Image (cartoon, helix red, strand yellow):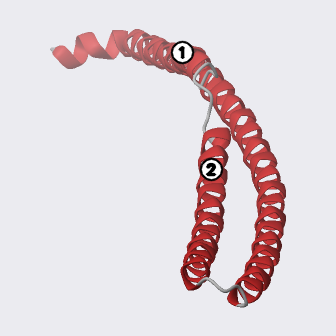
Amino acid sequence: MIDAVLGKFYKYIILVLMIFIFGYVFYANSLAGKLANAEKVKTKAIADAIKPYQDAIDQAQEEKAAIMQTWSAKIIEVEQNAIKQIQAANIDARNAKLSADSMSKQLSEANKRLSSAPKQTIINYAIANSELLESCTTEYRNLAEKADGHSLDAMRLYDSWPEQNKAL
């Protein structure tokens, strides 16, 4: 009996099934299109969300490069100034040594002249004073050299240190 009913309407049943299948295929293609569209929208939304952060990173890197260049230039300038100051300190130390050597010669000559004086106590006093003055001159020169070196090191560190009012 079913065969008799189906026999009459089989063309219509096949037609309905074909319409249903085509409709389902159309609906599936429609969903695939919507999915692809949604993926494009999602990708654009992610790119739009990331852009401010990427721009901030790029700007920070540019600022970092500018700050590093400024610091490098400042350190080079400070080092050049320190070299000039070291050279000036060496010249001053050499001049102090020459002055001390000249003073030593003068003291030596004075000691020779005093040695011919008749009074032994004057001679002993003058020699002791000459030796004391020579020792003081040498120590003073050494102290001045060390102080100059320390001062130059401190100024170099201070000048190369980043300023507090610079934005990082």
The three-letter code of the residue at mark 1 reads: Ala
Q: Of the numbered discs in the image, which one, if any, rests on residue 65?
A: none
In what quadrant of the picture does the C terminus appear?
top right
Q: Residue 8 vs residue 102: left or right?
A: left
Look at the picture and state if 29 lies above or below 71: above
- Could you say where residue 4 lies in the image, as x and y percent from the top left? 24, 14
- Of 105 and 15, nearer the camera is 105
Disc 1 designates what residue?
A: 49
Outermost residue to the front: 118
Q: Quadrant of residue 129?
A: bottom right
- Could you say where residue 155 lies in the image, as x and y percent from the top left? 65, 44
Q: Is mark 1 on a helix, strand or loop?
A: helix
In what quadrant of the picture does the N terminus appear?
top left
Q: In which quarter of the image is residue 153?
A: bottom right
The three-letter code of the residue at mark 2 reads: Ser
Q: What element carries label 2?
A: helix
Q: Residue at x 43, y 15 (%)?
A: 24
Q: Quadrant of residue 121?
A: bottom right
Q: Residue 44 vs residue 115: left or right?
A: left
User: Are dots 1 and 2 in contact, CB under 8 Å?
Assistant: no
Disc 2 designates what residue?
A: 151
Q: Which residue is drawn at 72% across and 47% down?
A: 75
How would you rate the neighbour count of disc 2 (Cα within 10 Å): few for under 14, some for 14-19, many for 20 or more?
Answer: few
Q: Residue at x 79, y 54 (%)?
A: 85
Q: Which of marks 1 and 2 is in front?
A: 2
How would you rate the neighbour count of disc 1 (Cα within 10 Å): few for under 14, some for 14-19, many for 20 or more?
Answer: few
Q: Residue at x 80, y 62 (%)?
A: 92
